[in-house]
Image: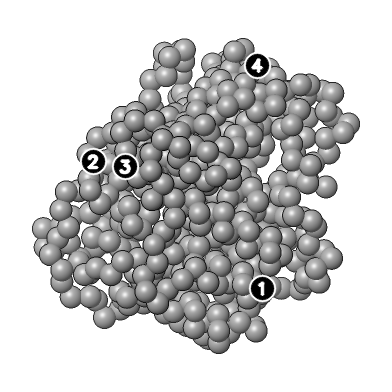
Amino acid sequence: MAYDCTRRHFFFGPLLAGAIPIAGFGSVPSLRALGYKSPNEKLNIASIGAGGKAASDIDGCTSENIVALCDVDQERAARKFTEYDKVPKYRDFRKMLDEQGSSIDAVIVAIPDFMHATAATWAMERGKHVYVQKPLTRTVWEARQLMEAANKYKVATQMGNQGYSNEGTRQAAEMIWAGEIGSVTEVHAWTDRPIWPQGLAEIPAPDRVPDTLDWDLWLGIAEQRPYTSGGPDYKSPIGGHFYQPENWRGFYDFGCGALGDMACHILGAANLALRLGAPASVECIHKEGASNFMFPAKSVIRYDFPARGSMPAVKLFWHDGLKETPKIPGVPEGELLGDLPRKPFGRPAGQTASQGPPWQRPFTGMIGNVFNWETFEKDKNGSDLVVPPPDGSLFIGDKGMISTGTYGEQTRLIPVEKMADYKFPQPLLTRSPGHYRDWIRACKGGDPACSNFNVAAPFVEWMLLGVIALRFDGKLEWDASKMRFTNNAEANKYLKPTFRKGWTLT
């Protein structure tokens, strides 16, 4: 079982009532009876996407067999294509799945947001387990479709929001369920994203598509449009051309902005701990740098969630485009929230900087999964500490406050002095073996992964309502049972994507 709630329920009291799903993190039955691989037998994994984030996802699955790779951008994929020089390579994932399907057990989907659902559905329909990068999908309808498909085809799934596997995320839930800060009625989450361009007013003139890029395949289901590199005067703060390789996040048609990039990480602890479900309404209450085709440069979004069992109604605020942690009433002056200053990253002898992203490499100092008072006191005034970008969350209860870092790490009471003699509650939730290992284990017949689609899709659904709210002024009232906004017919048009001729979800 994913949870052992019967013998500890009395300890966590009424706050816990209704907070734990009966079947654990997922609601699908155990996969052991479905004839999956032995835990000692390696999976055959293909990846749709080989450059960018896909490269680190592939690295996270190197305990298994990587048997096929697909990427529309040959330059971006070059490193992984070279590393796996003997496996078949493709530009079109449909062709890869048709030709290599019999040799593939599971598929990584790590391409731009607007193509996640189509690629994942193609894989699941063919009986392949899927690991899909956050934010799972670009629209609410697609999120529901993926959850239904996962249950229909009985495949193991996982969304790529690593924070859901972190110790600190579980600690935050257990602290709140133990009543450490009383009833939580307000949550704040914040990020420095976007670090890519947003809020631009004009699309540069078309120019030649690079020989290494299949622009038509890159567009996939999206409406046809000319390619542009941005021209000689275009300068992206993170490099690249106008739309790609990473700037697509800022476009309504392709990405989900800062919310899509970071909310699935930063708000994971809130979603788990508070069992948020569906909000009653969502509203963009502040934005700067509005655009007809891009997300704004900066925004604040408010979600209002009704009472859930014994948990009271909660208002949740998302802040993006920040250069520093927001000032939140009630937080003592000078208190550190979110990510803490840290020592520089280190890695073992022989490991290069290209072997996985920073959060997967060994490190020293104050960043990590678990807050430690002694380490905090020892290192807090160190001259070599690095001040991280503003990312994190704050839970406000009627008896106190809790803050977490980007991925749920460094969970601690606020003010931090309360941690001097603090003992975390006895574990209630099972601990993850690691986000990729959790999925791999599920693929081989283990319990559902912690962010499987029965968990991830409802989480993503409420997050994506904020993506739509960025396009409108005023509050949007949400009816989850009918999948519609009740007071804005225009907003309902953005709940489902349109598909270019020749493309479908399946």
Residue 188 percent across, percent down from the top left:
47, 27
Please name which of the two marks, 3 or 1, marks the residue nearer to the observer: 3
Mark before the other along the chain sequence, 3 or 1:
1
Circle 2 crowding by C-alpha within 10 Å: few under 14, some 14–19, many from 20: some
Q: Secondary structure at mark 2?
A: loop
Q: Nearer the viewer, residue 446 or 351?
A: 446
Residue occupying image coordinates x 42% and y 73%: 503
Task: Tell me how many marks there are.
Answer: 4
Q: CA distance from mark 1 to mark 4?
A: 45 Å
* Disc 3 target residue: 471
Please name which of the two marks, 4 or 2, marks the residue nearer to the observer: 2
**Quarter of the rendering containing residue 170:** top right
* Disc 4 target residue: 182
Q: CA distance from mark 2 to mark 1?
A: 42 Å
In this rendering, does residue 489 appear at all? yes
Labels 3 and 1 touching (C-beta < 8 A): no
Q: CA distance from mark 4 to mark 3?
A: 35 Å
Residue type at tag 1: Gly
